[in-house]
Amino acid sequence: MLSFESDYIQGAHEKILQRLVETNMEALPGYGSDKYCESAKEKIRQACDCEEAEIFFLTGGTQTNEIIIGTMLAPYEGVIAAKTGHVSVHEAGAIEHTGHKVLELPQHDGKLDAKEVQQYLKTFWEDGNHEHMVFPGMVYISHPTEYGTLYTKAELEELADICRSYQIPLFLDGARLGYGLMSNDTDVTLPMIAGCCDVFYIGGTKVGALCGEAVVFPKRNMPKHFLTMVKQNGALLAKGRLLGVQFDTLFTDDLYYRISKHAIEMAEDLKRLFREKGYRFYLDSPTNQQFIILEDSQMQKLQQEVAFSFWEKYDESHTVVRFATSWATTEEDIERLGKLLIF
């Protein structure tokens, strides 16, 4: 079956598999203390233009979000997120499982509005009963968002300024960061993210790796005894080399950027195809996730030949669905889809 279901449905880029095989029989120290992890960290520091960055490798997005939020917040604090944010909707209560509440704000095409964040913080601190409330201790955003949309440089800088003024960290979920950085419609760079955010991660699972997320603390602000707390949460990988080799490969010869750019090129082809066939878009996404409104019977027929993701109901007879391209999408995949689309 043809699949546009997500960007992690294939295994891993062939260069990663090749390096894993080549290094397989090397005897290396465990828990991320091997030479490949160190090499990957240095390459990521260079890519971020941030020599003081502290970097830690984890295996998956939900695990990463849970550990970052759980270790950086005080017991009485919660995290501000858009109502549609990944930590709000699609992580099965993982954040709440740590004892921290997700403090939801309205979303605007998946994004938080900086002025609404500022008003929320102002209202909280002006409330005479705030000692009886969950303290807002962090702002969480994802880039790209759940709707494939992107923050602009100005929007990120405004959020960063607000967080600094209230002395709380800005956390950017970068599970699909490569696709955001290589979008044709962005003015955001990796060094700029490192300058604005207090913590972010570079996603590997959805961008060519078997698994893995690279957490970056750009201001020498990694929580004290972070490795110990990661292990306490059952998230310390004994064979840390698995992550180090993959990220070392992704950040060699711009592989991470090149395969991300390919996904964007395939997404642009996908958008042209849907437009030519007369399909309606739910919103304008500049990244690899495209959201289409399908009539329900049309959706059911297409599902017999193509895998894609349910997103939300549009009305009684229409559904918003997601088609995602990835580092592994081919021109032949787009051509095959075109033959199946009937409007």
Image (cartoon, rainbow, N blue to C red):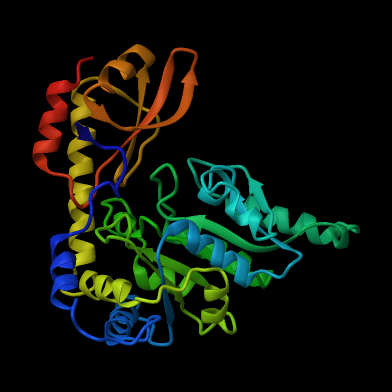
Up/down of 141 relative to 231, above or below: above
Which residue does the image show at 53% across and 41% down from the upper left? 108
Q: Residue at x 43, y 76 (%)?
A: 56
The residue that appears at 66% across and 70% down in the rendered structure is 165
Quarter the C terminus occupies: top left
**In the image, residue 229 lies at what x, y percent?**
57, 76
Q: Quadrant of residue 193?
A: bottom left
User: What is the quadrant of the N terminus in the image?
Assistant: top left
The answer to whether any part of residue 341 appears in the image is: yes
For image coordinates 51% across by 45% down, the residue present is 90
- Relative image position of residue 65 (x, y in whole percent): 52, 61
Q: Total label count?
A: 0
Q: Is residue 56 left or right of residue 268?
A: right
Q: Which percent across, then down, holds residue 35? A: 28, 87
Decide: is 325 above or below 134.
above
Residue 252 x, y percent position in the rendering:
19, 75
Q: Is residue 52 left or right of residue 256?
A: right
Give residue 79's quadrant in the image: bottom right
Q: Can residue 197 be seen by looking at this rendering?
A: no
Does 102 sit above or below residue 268? Answer: below
Q: Nearer the viewer, residue 199 or 184?
A: 199
Based on the displayed image, in which of its 4 quarters is residue 337 positioned?
Answer: top left
